[in-house]
Image (tube, rainbow, N blue to C red):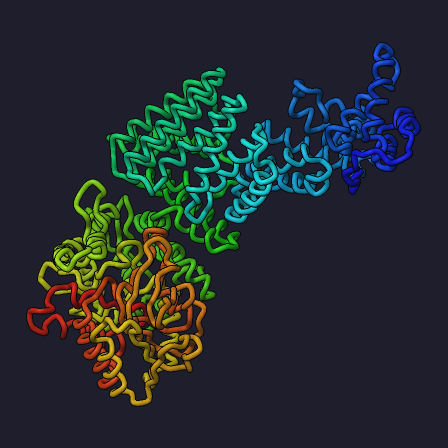
Amino acid sequence: MRGTPRLPRADSAGSDPSVPLDAFCTARDWAKAADVIRDSGGVLLGDAAGRLARERLERYRDRMFETVPHRLTVLLRCREKPYAEVLLPLVATEVLGPYAQIVLPAPGRRPDPDEHDAACTAALALPAADRPDVRALVLFYRAIGRVQRGTRQRDLPGLVADLAAAQQVLTAAEYPGLWVDVTQALGECLRRMEVGDRAANLERAIAELEVLSDHLRGTGGIPEANALNSLGDAYARRVAGGDRKRAAAALEESFRIFGAAGGVHYQGSVARNLATLAVTDDDRAPHERIAGAFRWSQTAEECFAARGMTLEVARTRADLGGACALYAEREDVPAFHRHAIDLIQASYEVDWSGLDRRDYAMSRTNLAACLLQEARTAADQEEAIGHFTVALDYLDPSDASGRAIVLNNRGFTLLEQDRLEEAAADLLQAAAMVAMELDQAVRAEQELAVVGRLDELHGGAALVLTRLGRYQEALDVAEWGRGRLLARTLGLSATGAAPVAAIDGVTLVVPIITRTGSVVLVVPPGTTELTERNAVPIQGFGSGALRRITVGSRNGEAGWLMRRFAVDAAETPEEHRAALGEFIQAVAASMPLIGASLGAPIVAALTALDVPHGTTVALLADGELAVTPLHAATLPDGTTLASRWDIVYAPSVAVLRLSARRGADVPAPGSALLVGDPTDTLQYAEVELEDLRRRLPGATRTLDEDLASEYAGEHLLHIACHGVHDWRAAGGSYLEMYPGRTTTSAEIARYRLDGCRLATLSACETGLHAFLQARDEFLGLPAAFLQAGAAAALCTLWRVDDLATSLFMHRFYDGLLSRGLTPARALREAAAWLRDHGDTYREPFFWAGFVLVGV
């Protein structure tokens, strides 16, 4: 029956309906009956044949021992629905023989799940199942049966394949009702599938569900509401930050349609999805988000309770507990951890663990995490560990993302209990699962979601390895977890930091800052084996303390880094001056805090390891520390790291090694390409370019062309213009290099700047990276220039002063070009000169924001 067109309903002129009607009623089987409709459908489905069929049906009504009444009833049904969809179950019943009653159960009858699955599999092996339409129907029923009995992640790819194969045959044109059911099931399976490319699975689910929703639009029934509910949830799950507005619109429409159609318990499912969506709605104030979550959860409970669905009530409470846990974590509201604990524990009064194994595991994980927030004793921590262990038992072994989350949390808890071997096993296993996910990722959005999902994972693993005395392994794990996306783009190996002495003349300083504790690995050149001397514990300082200094607390004082937003938000010159003054003071106040906590132990280690003053020290920092001027932190004796060593920054050993290799190919920069400010609002940008022209008479200037086409292998690239860091998406950070348009970091990364020894980004915020999205990564303008081929980039950490920048650049190029200093030494001397150039520029704001990424 595949390929049978939808037949006309009008009578053919001059045709006698009794002849094809008799042929239909006496056909040998349902397949032959279908052939009669295919050949004479215009007559059989016309009005005259319908009247004749109803007359005959009345005549044969009491003679049920004959097949004719049944045939006539089927024919009349074919006038209301596509005949292929009406006849397919009858054909399948005939050809499947004894399996038919189990594979195609009567309405209201639910066969044993294992028996049904076995019957479907056996039926697919029958010769009769070679019919594409029958095979597609059996595949669909088998998939539905497996979904209803509960599936593991490892089963979903097979279900998707079965449903996709069925959809190819059961098309919307020939089998509209079946197509709706198949497409709904396919979208649901894809939406839930974590195996493989999670982002691609979601996008495929959205594509299927959008087509389904368009097909059903305006029908106002349960199928349309179901499709909108699934589509809304898929929008909300989108890897790249979700699509909340479209998700809310779809879910709210689904809720309305279910209500109009009498689907009260279905409304509960939609309300639960809306509750989950509410707590992550960043367009609303925090208290509005949590209030929305409570309101929709209460609605969901009422809907489920009205139908006596106690399992769904329990699951709704657990989901609300998860929302409270997320709110407590994001907004730093400890009281909501207790709300989360009470709600999740209350949900366990009913055994709903068999409803959805992953949901149950994640509720246990949320409960454990909240218990840890209130833990006061080792027994409290042990209780949380027990919940993490239960969660792992319920998670499918193939669910890498779910297992990594639980192992990460349990590993840190074990670390706090000094159960080091167990902690190392958990954290290293979680890291391996993240690596596996990343290897499977094929889209940039999914890569970012994978690496950003587990903050501090590799740092935690490195920390516990140092405490176990496995120092080289610790360095390798720290390296493995940093700048993974940049390393992949650059084609660099992620196998670790060995050999440790691969960068001549450079001492590696690797701060590992975690929620549980911190350590710094210090590796001077020539080191062949790491020992206890190379690992410096940082007492009383972790990621929480660092975050308070830099970002601040949502309920407390803003950190120095966040104070810069007030500068951007200023609307009048007076507000701008006041905000800028507060930012300058905040930077200055933070420097002694960073110096005492982190700078002093690093200096002590460098001194103990006999690292000579004046040599190059590379700070391999991540997270907030990577955008903090650690080189300028004030030490207890009033000095700084930069007053003793030439300080450079890099996201990883692999990137630093690449920078050194590229830099060695250009020993003495002798040519330059200059890019100025097209807006003419930076008074001293042109001064910088004129200074470089005097030093390098052959320097060329771009005006309104594209940098990619203008670059001709120049050793230096100096860009003096406006720059903006995009805090939401690092790929959107940009430079205003040409009139009327901006050039984003995503565009710059595609340039070819091979041969460029140094890209000087004399613009605001060019040294920032997207630590809010993925703390261990290095995404932004510096990474873009490294991807394009530059050996190193001179960048800025905030909105720098125009005149101070021009003075700094004059002194920097005097050292680099006139005196032949390395970029790192030229930067060090220029910053010191500017700082000591009278009282005007003594504050760190004016000179500490210039950093060199690479060597």
Residue 492 location in percent, x, y?
A: 45, 65
- Quadrant for the N terminus, please: top right
Please state the horizontal and vertical placement of residue 783, each as a whole percent of the image.
37, 65
Residue lying farthest to the left in this orientation: 839
Q: Residue at x 16, y 57 (%)?
A: 572
- Residue farthest to the bottom? 697
Q: Residue at x 64, y 24 (%)?
A: 113
Residue 855 sits in quarter: bottom left
Relative to the observer, which residue lies in front, 115 or 248?
248
Residue 635 in which image quadrant: bottom left
Residue at image coords 53%, 23% = 263
Question: Nearest the camera: 258 or 647?
Answer: 258
Asked whether 811 or 282 is in front, the reply is 282
Left or right of residue 381, residue 88 in this image: right
Numbered marks: total: 0
In this orientation, does residue 523 appear? no
Q: Describe residue 576's horizontal placement relative to residue 235 as left or right.
A: left
**Which x, y percent locates residue 721?**
28, 71
Vertical arrangement, residue 236 with respect to residue 802, above or below: above
Counting from the top left corner in percent of width and height, residue 849 is at 21, 65
User: Does 185 sit left or right of 430 as displayed?
Assistant: right
As drawn, 589 above or below 716: above
Q: Residue furthest front?
A: 13
* Residue 748 visible in the picture: yes
| Above or below: residue 279 compared with residue 551 | above
